[in-house]
Image (tube, rainbow, N blue to C red):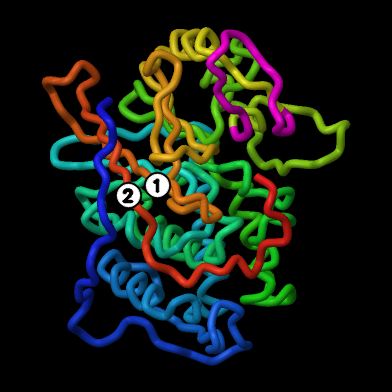
Amino acid sequence: MSDPAVNEPMNDEPISNGEPVVRVQREGSKSPISSHPFKYFDVPWPPREEHIAEIAETMRKSEGTLLPDTPLFLRTLEEATRLLKERPNIVDIGVEGDQRLTVVGDVHGQFFDVCQIFGLASGFVSDQRMFLFNGDLIDRGSFGVEILFIIMYQLIARPDRMFVNRGNHESSYCTRDYGFMKECLTKYTAESGAFDASLRLFRALPIGTRVQSSIFVVHGGIWEDLSITLEDIQKMDRDFDFSADVETEVTPLMQALWSDPDPANGLSPSFRPYVRKFGPDRTAQFLDTNKLDFLVRSHEMVNNGYTSHHNDTMCTLFSAPNYMRAKNNGAIMMIAPAADEPLGITMEAVSYIAAQCPETYPYLSCVAI
């Protein structure tokens, strides 16, 4: 794959000329992001494809002060959880005709960059536009609630076009230290049940996605016991959480969310829990065993948002630009049908700089990477 193209943030464009879909219901406590209090809105139910752009743009323009009302947020999470539970551990999807799949890496609570991603993809879910978010939607950034809502709203409106894998941060273990628990409790309070509903949704998320039967997309990487195939993974129970307890039984599903590649063959030590790093020989064995051609993973910040590994059989895709003020680019991957290509598809990485946003990291209690 060639080096990714770099895109500047898109200019504002009008979204809707009709009656407003977003109805502000009430005002709440003061937002730590700005001098204004939170305001809470409602929208028509059930979710509809034609309402998505107006909702997202209204939220974006509020600069972190406009949130879905508690009943709306809970209903969205609960319905999305129900739909996610119907999906297998490894979801199979394909692209055909004029369709395009946009694969998105870690976004870590950076809602304004998620809005930019939809702009780079020329819009939200539709007959032609599919999305696959590869985990770590939340934590560290200040807008995990907004990201969860706009993605799950689309998943309900078009379950055939929105797909989401689980990341290691979709857990009580990570959200406790890296911001989302505090964010959720600040925006909705403990009594609302919003944080608990988020945790239930996280445990329902699939582990990985197979695209066109040849590309495997997973948050971290591969597990250590390579005799375990994707078909074996399909039979495992994904309703689990992580624990800091040293007695925790480490499973292949946990390793899929936490592992990282290494340039040396074999397995090597990692600073992360539950895993060791895996080398190019391990990637080659995994791809061969499971009859795959390429591995897409996320989980690590890379300077241009995209980098290849292991003789160009795998890439890291990271979609949170200026992550923790690191001045990195973000990137997404566009996959489209192409009959004249060896895999029957094209894969294009698009790199971009950070959107303007009011980020101040008010919910972060720990800044370790």
Q: Outermost residue, left direction?
A: 340
Q: Which residue is mark 2?
A: 352
- Return the residue nearer the eye: 84 or 165: 165
| Badge 2 density bin: few <14, some 14–19, many ≥20, Cα 10 Å | many
Q: Are marks 1 and 2 in contact (CB under 8 Å)?
A: yes
Which numbered tag is attached to residue 330? 1
Up the image or down, 170 lies above or below 281; here it is below
- Which residue is drawn at the image coordinates 55% and 23% (left, top)? 261
Q: Which span of residues is magenta-colored?
A: 257-274
Residue type at mark 2: give it. Answer: Tyr
Residue 281: horizontal and vertical position, in percent?
52, 7
- Which residue is drawn at the image coordinates 82% and 33% (left, top)? 248
Which numbered tag is attached to residue 164? none
Would residue 152 be counted in the magenta stretch? no
**Of label 1 and label 2, which has the lower sequence position?**
1
- Which residue is drawn at the image coordinates 17% and 20% (left, top)? 341
Secondary structure beneath dot 1 equals strand
- Which residue is drawn at the image coordinates 52% and 44% (left, top)? 135
Q: Quadrant of the C terminus?
A: top right
Up the image or down, 77 lies above or below 188; here it is above
